[in-house]
Amino acid sequence: MPKATVAAIITPDDNKPGIILLTKRSVHPFQGHWCLPGGHIDEYETAEDAVVREVMEETGLHFISPVFLYFFNEVFPQHQFHAVALAFYGTGRGNAELMPDEVEEIAWFSLNEALAMPLAFNHLQILQRYAQHRAL
C-alpha cells in the first residue's frame, strides 16, 4: 500500500516566494540528495499537522499557514518506495537549524537554482508545479 507523505515549500517571508529552503537527506532512500522538508503522515494526524510537524523536526522552523498546492505520486520500485505526497507552501518563521537525525545540510536557494538541481523523490515536479502556480 502507498504511504501518505507531505512536502513543504518554505519561503523566508511572504515577499520572497522565489527563495526556498532545501535539506540534504542523511537517510535512505535518496541519501545525499537535496529535497523539500517533509515526511510521513502519522496515524490519526491531519496532513496540515504533519507538514507543520515535519518542518519543525527537520528545520526547526514554524511553518505558518501552509497552503495546499497539489498531490504527487511517488513510485520508486528500485527503492521499494510508493507514496502519495501532498505538497504545501508557506512561510517559515524562526531560525533554520540543522537537525542531524535526518538532515545533513540545510540551505536557502533561489527557485531557479532549485529547479536546476537533481532533487530527491518527485520534488522537482513539485517545484515545477509551484513555479507555474506562482506565475498565474
Image (spheres, rainbow, N blue to C red):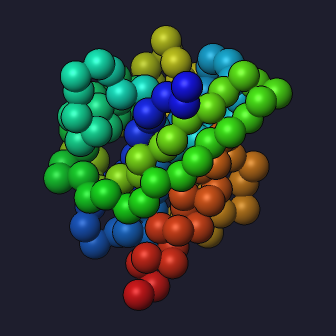
Using the image, determine if residue 120 lies above or below residue 102.
below
How many numbered dots are placed on residues in this image?
A: 0
Image location (x, y in percent) of residue 107 = 52, 43
Residue 19 occupies which quadrant of the picture?
A: bottom left
Image location (x, y in percent) of residue 109 = 54, 56
Is residue 107 in sight in this rendering? no
Image location (x, y in percent) of residue 14 = 25, 67
Image location (x, y in percent) of residue 62 = 22, 38
Residue at coordinates 19% horizontally, 49% vertically from top-left? 64
Q: Which residue is at the front of the view, 41 or 91? A: 41
| Residue lying at the far right of the rendered structure | 78
| Residue lying at the far front of the rendered structure | 1
The quadrant in which the N terminus is found is top right
Left or right: residue 66 versus residue 125 is left
Is residue 18 in sight in this rendering? yes
Residue at coordinates 29% horizontally, 19% vertically from top-left? 43
Residue at coordinates 51% horizontally, 78% vertically from top-left? 132
Using the image, determine if residue 42 lies above or below residue 11.
above
Using the image, determine if residue 30 lies above or below residue 67.
above
Q: Which residue is at the front of the view, 99 or 7? A: 7
Residue at coordinates 72% horizontally, 22% vertically from top-left? 80
Left or right: residue 130 versus residue 48 is right
| Residue lying at the far bottom of the rendered structure | 136
| Residue lying at the far left of the rendered structure | 65
The quadrant in which the C terminus is found is bottom left
